[in-house]
Image (spheres, helix red, strand yellow):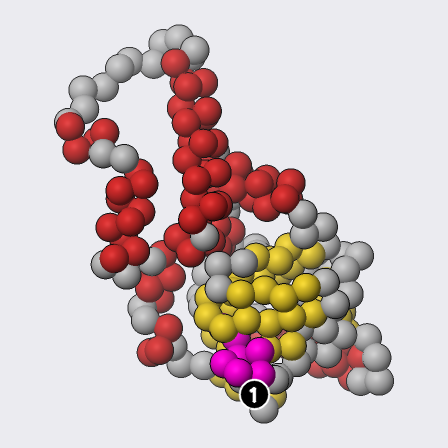
Amino acid sequence: MNGTLVKNQLIFDFASGALGPAKSLFASTYLYLNSRASRINRTFEGLLGEDLLDVKGIPVSKIKYSDCISKEDTLENNQKNNNDPLTMVFGPIKDIKWKQIYKGFNEFTPDFNDEDELKLIKMDPGISVPLHSHGGREYILVLKGSFCDEYGEYSKGDIQINDQKIKHTPIASKNEGCICLSITEKDVIFYGKFGSFLNLFTFIKSFFK
């Protein structure tokens, strides 16, 4: 599920304006952190822009020279000025008011008007999440540090997209921990010794969202 096609579909949907608020913020942050993904996005935007030339009845607008500045230059300027999408929406990560879920695992859930649940997750060095899957897709973007699971290791700018078939146990780097941006379409489903208890806790928690 975590292949190139799935990642490129996310970028294409962003370029075509097909994503909701949560996934748009996720995708724009991914493009900000990952230069390769940003180049793919510019390609998609160019292709979609060319399609507009074939549409009749759309008047040509007068534009200024500044409208023609390369998006690559704009991206580089944004990175130099630290105008990343998350900071623009939520402010500096260092100022986030985290909520401890259990020792070493903290979350920040913004009041975002979207059916997809967007979260910032902070895991202390070596902390893990119990074996789980999801009722829908799960999107994870590494903002700082790294984590690993049964499928690989993910560092700053990497994304992992999982479907309902994927079960995994994310473990934060033992050196610096991990901060991630996450989107879940449906509730998490836990497995193992404490799976039943954790699923009950998740079910009760859903009434207070």
- The amino acid sitting under disc 1 is Gly
Q: Is residue 194 left or right of residue 97?
A: right
**Residue projecting furthest to the bottom:** 103
Q: Residue at x 74, y 67 (%)?
A: 150
Could one spot residue 52 in this view of the protein?
Answer: yes
Q: Is residue 142 left or right of residue 57?
A: right
Crowd rating for badge 1 (residues with CA inside 10 Å; few <14, some 14–19, many 20+):
some
SS at mark 1? Answer: loop
Tell which of 130 and 145 is nearer to you. 145
Residue 84 lies in quadrant: bottom left
Instruction: In the rendered view, tell whether residue 122 sits above or below residue 21.
Output: below
Instruction: In the rendered view, tell whether residue 165 sits above or below residue 95.
Output: above
Instruction: In the rendered view, tell whether residue 100 sits above or below residue 53.
Output: below
Q: Is residue 188 left or right of residue 143?
A: right
Query: Which residue, given by chain and number where applicable, does mark 1 sit on?
Result: 104
Main SS of the magenta part reads: loop
Instruction: In the rendered view, tell whether residue 196 sits above or below residue 163.
Output: below
Which x, y percent locates residue 147?
60, 72
Q: Residue at x 58, y 91 (%)?
A: 103
The stretch of residues the image draws in magenta is 173-179
Is residue 174 located in the magenta-colored stretch of the structure? yes
Which x, y percent locates residue 85?
36, 56
Residue 92 lies in quadrant: bottom left
